[in-house]
Image (tube, helix red, strand yellow):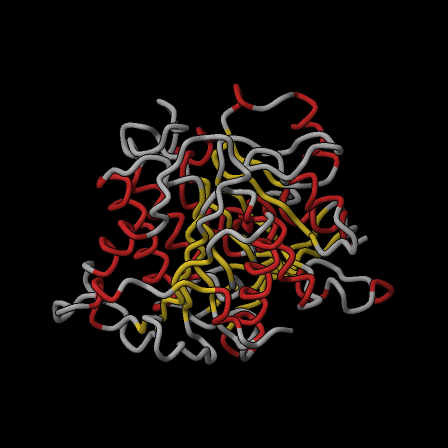
Amino acid sequence: MVSDINLFFEPVSPGLLENPVTGTLGARIEANVGNEFPEIEKGTVAIFSVAEYRGSDIQVNKDCGGEVRNELYNLKDHFGSLRIVDFGTIQPGETVKDTYYAVSTVVADVVKQGGIVIILGGSQDLTYANYLAYEKLEQVVNLVSVDSRFDIGDVEDEVQHDRYLQHIILHQPNILFNYSNLAFQTHHVQFKEVDLMKKMYFDTYRLGEVQADLENVEPVVRNADIVSFDLTSIRSSDFPSNVLSEPNGLYGEEACAISRYAGLSDKLSSFGLYNGNAVENSQGSKLTAQIIWYFLSGIANRKQDYPFADKEDYTKYIVTLQDGAYDVVFYRSDRSDRWWMEVPYPSRRGEKYERHFMVPCNYGDYTDACKGEIPDRWWQTFQKLG
């Protein structure tokens, strides 16, 4: 693995760091301004932008992160001892694959050292590059996409911002355990795509379902290693800076809440924001910065209750279903009041999927089991592990 990742980056503009206001993120973020490249240690959050848009056919603002950084650096610092660094910007390589290599190498290097990555794109096909980082780490992962579409094309399609998921699903070696989509809009997906998601036991949640019960999103995001957030899933009234935005979509505060859920997940190690820099506009930059702020807020408030730290910190519940055919074992964390389900893990599968047999859930899943209903989250994981 390449360790000189600084070679990939164009430094942050020194002007962003001039006379930072006390109590703001600008006063605490360690940024690469061309002299000493920030080191990574366990728990460090590393931010970087990627000015790669060749996976999209839209006209874009090439600034890529400058306006967002300006807004982010001026937000208030509420994050205690959390260490945050800013690597700068990865400029497009000679080919798109060169950019993908740079992104995957940087993510793998940071995650290997126990850091957490925030990628500010660029087009959403960079999710594929993010995914490839975990192949370098030999780690099977869960991917959550916040998107109005599934972004799955035909097998022969090139990787694009709206046609990259098939490349992740078919990539060998296969390191994808689960894919979840949040906030898809039915009028943007085909029947065959919905059927494919069901056949692969993937989780999909319509925009209306997400908005009707936002807290139900938390266990889905808590199960992710990677979150890919398409900023065009935010309605145009809240995010007017994007030419791809539409009338329907998430509200800004819902996007921030999902982002905070992602930050709270002890499992999650990379978070990408894409398709948000299409047109320079202060409101879009402000909202993007606030989404990052709430992700940082989640990280700063992590409870360190996954994986199990000490079983004495959990209350165990066993629910027997279908006349003894299944025992569903639940654990409730005394630290955070969050819930997990234990799914039987066949030893013949080896250690490859061992990280995925503890499934995040909520109290509603427990009450459903008490009524004799097998929770969907448990059943889908059981099918994959079986």
Which residue shows up at 79% across the image and 50% down it?
325
Front in this rendered view, residue 203 or 103: 103
Residue 357 visible, this angle: no
**Residue 29 vertical placement versus 145 (above, below):** below
Front in this rendered view, residue 82 or 2: 2
Q: Position of residue 27 (x, y in %)?
A: 20, 71
Which residue shows up at 22% across the image and 62% down it?
16
Which residue shows up at 81% across the image and 53% down it?
386
Front in this rendered view, residue 22 or 53: 53
Q: Position of residue 322 (x, y in %)?
A: 74, 45
Say left or right for 219 vs 371: left
Q: Position of residue 331 (x, y in %)?
A: 56, 64
Which residue shows up at 37% across the image and 44% down it?
62
| Outermost residue to the right | 348
Q: Position of residue 219 (x, y in %)?
A: 51, 52
Which quadrant holds the N terminus?
Answer: bottom right
